[in-house]
Amino acid sequence: MPALPSPGRLVRLLREQAEAVVALPGALVSLTRAVSSLDGTIREARDTVGRLQRLGERLEGILDEVEEPVKDLAPGLRRVGRVLDDPAVSEIPETVRRIRQDVLPLVATLRGGADVLDRFSARALLGGGRRRPEVAIPPTPPVIPPTPPAALPPEDPPAESGG
């Protein structure tokens, strides 16, 4: 037969049980808060999932609109990729630099020469290669307009002959 616990052990067990009963309301309050917090988190997660579903639907609509044009661009993009893979493309900046250093100064010089030629050809068209001396033309005398008849004094009528 099992032995009965000693009175000290019995008191200790009762004390532990009483402490557990005293701690029980605090644990229940803490558990209630945790469940309430979990409930709020679940509601937020449910709202977030709903928003993500709406966002997914919108993105799907956008992709439906964009998908065909992007697919239509694919062959051209592949051709551009092949062109850009060509080693000659990597030489373009150096070629442009050489053109700026070597060719553009020559073009500027040619332009200056063309301007000079334009001036000479314009001079030739306007009067030959040499300038003609200017001849002084005397000024013309002013013309005085005739006075109108109304401004003249009336004439005497002619005398009649009597005989």
Image (cartoon, rainbow, N blue to C red):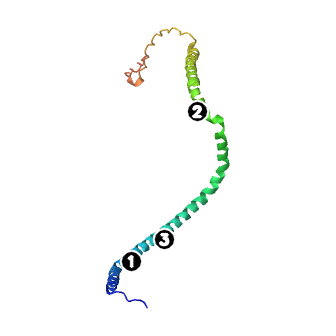
Residue 104 image position (x, y, % from top left): 57, 25
User: Disc 2 vs disc 1: Cβ atoms closer than 8 Å?
Assistant: no
Residue tagged by mark 1? 32
Tell me: residue 104, above or below residue 16.
above
- Classify residue 33 as left or right of residue 45: left
Residue tagged by mark 3? 46
Residue tagged by mark 2? 93
Crowd tier of the residue under label 1, counting other residues whose Cα lies within 10 Å: few below 14, some 14–19, many 20 or above? few
Q: Nearer the viewer, residue 118 or 3?
A: 3
Nearest to N terminus: mark 3 or mark 2: 3
Q: Nearer the viewer, residue 121 or 48?
A: 48
Residue 97 image position (x, y, % from top left): 57, 29
- State the SS at label 2: helix
Tell me: residue 57, above or below residue 7.
above
| Mark 3 vs mark 2, CA separation in Å | 56 Å
- State the SS at label 3: helix
Numbered mark located on residue 13 in the image = none
The image quadrant of residue 63 is bottom right
| Mark 2 vs mark 1, CA separation in Å | 72 Å
| Mark 3 vs mark 1, CA separation in Å | 21 Å
